[in-house]
């Protein structure tokens, strides 16, 4: 399987391309692939699929395309290739190995090409990368603004690769091939000055000077006519070089060829009397003995990838620590660093949580790209998160200046003066400066070199947004390792034989370490020193959360130690919020839940979450949704263990209050529980829901969190909270009845019975019985529902009794006991009318109408359905309206009034489709397919059935 973006958006399989269908589905696939393995919000997908105001049903359209795309991938056995299209709350993520995406392979080949020491090898890599292109990027897709920007970015990368290939041909002396390559691209991009300049130089060096000059004049006229501008520096410099008759690359130094440089090397400006140290000219000679105190500088033997150095000159300075051992994975991040390091005076910012491998990534990239920095590489550990404290700026600058050849007596005493000298000395050099473990932007700014060809690589646990704003730092965020890479890291330390002997245990260890390289290395260190231990035994020990962090610390060097150094730099309010987050029973948290945990308000909680995110202690996976790494959660939980119950009650009551608001918005007047639990702690603020759709989205997104909260409540003996949190999800249960709700409702039933609450038991039995009925388990449903009306009467809950009678009637009708079922429904209608509850009365009349229809009494069915429809306004809940309209349609058909019947059934189906109620649409369309030969009904039925079968 292969995903193609470099040309027509496609999915190639062994049997041929998948039939992706319309352009918008290709756009959806493209948007997911461009952010492969990263959640993409529905809002972002909407922007990609529409370039103007999206339709009101945009979300439904996207869901339909996702369902169809998921079905195509499943049918192509995508799972065997590690491909999965998953739903994560309000977002979708396409998980796929990067090797399956042509755009990712293109970037990797480009990165490998830049690492080659031989120009011939570079040419091979670049040609292979360009061979992946089969036309303009993202062809065949409807390109909304984000996709247009992505296609432009990909095309820019392709053109830059073409230019690099042409320069490499020039390094090899193959100027005719460079000219042929560039001629075609220049014809397609006549206004791209860099292409025209490269073509001019290739033509000139191939002995075609007149053609080169003609190309300049044609491009100059085109720029003037089309854009009203004069040629830029690149074009003008190429023209001047040709007029001067400068020699071609054959006369250049061998070092320039080996580097595949984008331009001539900067000549040294030192006079014969100057002292040259580390390729830096110092105007004043050193005083005898001044260099005695300078730290030793690592030396490397010269290679063909380094610039030619005069025998009397020392080699370029290199303060870089050794490359990390056992480095695994990170292909995408290394490629991202390569992209970030391009341009003028780039500052690359590697950020991530403690122990994620930021320093290892920076050093790996620095060692792989040694040839890019002929004047040397500097390194400083800024110790921003160390108990030893940060070094003074002047100390770091002094080390840099001494390494660059400045005599000790000439190093300024003040940090500003030293920084100015550092910028001056690096102004014409090609240096790499690695600043590790930076805590704030101000520290980094004073250590930035002055040269436009210098690259600064910064690592930090903080996001350093100030550095992004002031110095255009390019962030490269670092996340945890995938399980396969984590397993490979273990093998790199322990040896492949030991890991291959226990592959399942090795993967389990990688999972328990949460993909955190520091935790994996500590685990490997424990095992390496104890060859008699099995991987499975250590995995069993790590599985116990209570001791996991202790096992992952060795000599105070481990996960807990790293996290402690991060937390100690936080303000008290952020530490308090962090400690309370450790007691959250769910997977993600929003500012409202965080406020309930900490006993604050959502504004203060959001500010604390932002501060924690800046320190990479939490991650924002979607707007307003935050998660903690498992090991970080364990550490946070241990900061304030005494607050566990208080925090749990706070977040449970937040869940109850918010679910009540959601249920009331989704089904006004229909919430199943009115009495709040004893000792209820009302949150400082409860989320407002604008409409039913928003409320349903919240219930859907929070389903897993609410289930985990209910289980935590049950485990803590808070039974009255557990069943309420579950039962309050009833609008979502009704909407997605076949979505495996039974285990959760059984937990609610256990909680209700443990609390000896007849009201709760009746309500839970009523809902659970209906779900079992819809699952085809009628006998089990009937056995449970028999008790529900009696329990409701005992609890003094007449509306609960009416609902129980309705659901009991449904299951009895399913079992063929139609008279008893009709009697139960009629009794429910009486109870609802006595309580003046139109919502419950509509529900009872709907089922009574269906039973009259089953009993072949369509006139009565029609009367009951019309009465029910008259009870509710036009905006009454769409599912019920659709079902009632369908009953009316079927009744008209039974009375021989086919036109009216088809019209009402079509209306029922359309209202269900518009509301996303696929089950109601399928029911109405099934009758229409049996009644009429109209082909559109069959098509709509198949689409609704597919959406229902593949619903996330």
Image (cartoon, helix red, strand yellow):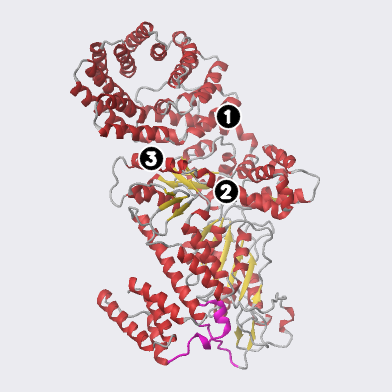
Q: Residues within 10 Å of mark 1 (few under 14, many from 20)?
A: many
Spot the residue most to the bottom: 272
Left or right? Give the position of 375 relative to 673: right
Residue 917 falls inside the magenta stretch: no
Where disc 3 sits, the SS reads helix
Q: What kind of secondary structure does the magenta stretch mostly adopt?
A: loop
x, y percent for residue 382: 63, 63
Residue at image x 24%, y 31%? 934
x, y percent for residue 368: 61, 67
Quadrant in the picture for the C terminus? top left
For disc 1, the marked residue is 712
Q: Quadrant of residue 737?
A: top left
Q: Which residues are magenta?
A: 245-271
- What is the distance, in whole Å, between disc 1 and disc 2 at their CAs? 23 Å
How many numbered callouts? 3
Residue 63: give its label.
3
Which residue occupies the foreground of this view, 159 or 743? 159
For disc 2, the marked residue is 617
Q: Nearer the viewer, mark 1 or mark 3?
A: 3
Where disc 2 sits, the SS reads loop
Q: Earlier in the sequence, mark 2 or mark 3?
A: 3
Residue at image x 31%, y 84%? 217
Q: Is residue 867 shown to the viewer in this render?
A: yes
Q: Earlier in the sequence, mark 1 or mark 2?
A: 2
Compared to 225, does 676 lie above or below? above
Q: Is residue 568 shown to the viewer in this render?
A: no
x, y percent for residue 206: 43, 85
Q: Earlier in the sequence, mark 1 or mark 3?
A: 3
Q: Quadrant of residue 378?
A: bottom right
């Amino acid at each position: 399987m292969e995903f193609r973006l470099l040309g027509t958006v496609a999915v190639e399989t062994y049997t041929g391309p998948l039939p992706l269908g319309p352009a918008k589905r290709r756009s959806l696939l493209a948007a997911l692939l461009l952010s492969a393995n990263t959640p993409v919000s529905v809002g972002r997908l909407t922007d990609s699929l529409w370039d103007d105001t999206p339709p009101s049903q945009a979300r439904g359209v996207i869901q339909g395309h996702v369902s169809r795309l998921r079905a195509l991938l499943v049918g192509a056995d995508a799972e065997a290739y590690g491909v999965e299209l998953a739903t994560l709350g309000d977002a979708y993520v396409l998980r796929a190995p990067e090797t399956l995406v042509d755009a990712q392979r293109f970037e990797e080949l480009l990165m490998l090409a830049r690492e080659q020491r031989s120009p011939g090898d570079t040419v091979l890599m670049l040609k292979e990368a360009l061979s992946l292109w089969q036309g303009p990027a993202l062809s065949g897709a409807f390109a909304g603004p984000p996709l247009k920007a992505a296609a432009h970015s990909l095309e820019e990368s392709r053109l830059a690769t073409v230019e690099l290939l042409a320069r490499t041909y020039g390094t090899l002396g193959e100027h005719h091939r460079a000219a042929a390559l560039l001629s075609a691209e220049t014809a397609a991009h006549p206004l791209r000055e860099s292409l025209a300049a490269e073509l001019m130089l290739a033509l000139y060096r191939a002995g075609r000077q007149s053609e080169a000059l003609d190309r300049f004049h044609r491009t100059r006229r085109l720029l003037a006519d089309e854009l009203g501008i004069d040629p830029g520096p690149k074009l003008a410099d190429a023209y001047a070089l040709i007029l001067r008759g400068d020699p071609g690359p054959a006369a250049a130094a061998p070092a320039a060829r080996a580097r595949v440089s984008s331009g001539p090397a900067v000549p040294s400006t030192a006079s014969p009397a100057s002292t040259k140290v580390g390729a830096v000219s110092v105007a004043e000679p050193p005083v005898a003995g001044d260099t005695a105190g300078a730290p030793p500088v690592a030396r490397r033997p010269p290679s063909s990838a380094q610039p030619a150095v005069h025998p009397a000159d020392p080699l370029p300075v290199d303060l870089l620590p050794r490359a990390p051992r056992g480095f695994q994975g990170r292909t995408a991040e290394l490629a991202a660093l390569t992209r970030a390091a391009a341009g003028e005076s780039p500052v690359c910012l590697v950020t991530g949580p403690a122990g994620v491998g930021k320093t290892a990534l920076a050093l790996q990239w620095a060692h792989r790209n040694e040839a890019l920095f002929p004047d040397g590489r500097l390194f400083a550990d800024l110790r921003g998160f160390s108990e030893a404290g940060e070094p003074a700026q002047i100390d770091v600058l002094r080390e840099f200046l001494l390494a660059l050849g400045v005599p000790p007596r000439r190093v300024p005493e003040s940090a500003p003066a030293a920084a100015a000298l550092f910028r001056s000395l690096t102004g014409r050099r090609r240096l790499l400066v690695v600043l590790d473990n930076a805590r704030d932007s101000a520290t980094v700014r004073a250590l930035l070199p002055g040269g436009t060809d210098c690259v600064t690589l910064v690592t930090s646990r903080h996001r350093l947004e100030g550095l992004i704003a002031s110095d255009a730092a390019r962030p490269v965020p670092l996340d945890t390792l995938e399980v396969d890479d984590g397993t490979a890291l273990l093998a790199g330390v322990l040896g492949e034989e030991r890991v291959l002997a226990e592959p399942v245990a090795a993967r389990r260890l990688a999972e328990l370490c949460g993909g955190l390289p520091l935790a994996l290395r500590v685990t490997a260190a424990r095992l390496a020193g104890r060859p008699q231990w099995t991987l499975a035994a250590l995995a069993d020990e790590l599985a116990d959360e209570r001791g996991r962090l202790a096992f992952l610390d060795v000599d105070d060097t481990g996960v807990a130690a790293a996290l402690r150094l991060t937390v100690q730099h936080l303000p008290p309010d952020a530490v308090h919020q962090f400690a309370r987050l450790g007691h959250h029973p769910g997977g993600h948290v929003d500012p409202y839940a965080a406020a309930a945990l900490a006993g604050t308000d959502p504004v203060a909680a959001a500010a604390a979450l932002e501060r924690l995110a800046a320190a990479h202690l939490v991650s924002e996976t979607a707007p307003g949704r935050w998660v903690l790494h498992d090991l970080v959660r364990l550490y946070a939980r241990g900061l304030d263990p005494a607050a566990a119950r208080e925090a749990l009650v706070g977040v449970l009551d937040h869940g109850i209050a918010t679910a009540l608001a959601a249920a009331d918005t989704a089904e006004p007047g229909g919430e199943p529980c009115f009495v709040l639990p004893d000792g209820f702690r009302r949150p400082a603020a409860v989320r407002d829901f604008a409409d039913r759709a928003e409320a349903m989205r919240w219930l859907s997104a929070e389903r897993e969190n609410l289930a985990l909260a209910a289980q935590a409540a049950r485990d803590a003996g808070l039974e009255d909270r557990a069943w309420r949190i579950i039962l309050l999800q009833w609008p979502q249960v009704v909407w997605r009845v076949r979505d495996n709700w039974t285990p959760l409702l059984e937990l609610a039933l256990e909680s209700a019975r443990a609390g000896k609450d007849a009201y709760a038991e009746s309500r839970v039995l009523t809902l659970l019985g209906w779900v079992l009925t819809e699952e085809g388990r009628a006998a089990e449903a009937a056995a449970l529902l028999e008790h529900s009306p009696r329990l409701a009467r005992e609890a003094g809950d007449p509306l609960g009794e009416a609902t129980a009678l309705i659901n009991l009637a449904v299951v009895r009708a399913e079992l063929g006991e139609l008279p008893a079922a009709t009697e139960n429904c009629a009794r429910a209608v009486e109870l609802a009318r006595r309580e003046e509850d139109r919502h419950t009365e509509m529900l009872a009349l709907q089922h009574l109408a269906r039973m009259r229809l089953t009993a072949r009494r369509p006139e009565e069915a029609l009367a009951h359905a019309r009465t029910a429809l008259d009870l509710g306004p036009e905006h009454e809940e769409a599912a019920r309206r659709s079902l009632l309209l369908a009953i009316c349609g079927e009744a008209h058909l039974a009375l021989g009034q086919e036109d009216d019947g088809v019209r009402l059934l079509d209306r029922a189906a359309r209202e269900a489709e518009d509301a996303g109620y696929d089950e109601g649409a399928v029911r109405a369309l099934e009758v229409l397919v049996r009644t009429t030969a109209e082909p559109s009904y069959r098509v709509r039925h198949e689409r609704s059935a597919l959406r229902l079968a593949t619903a996330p």
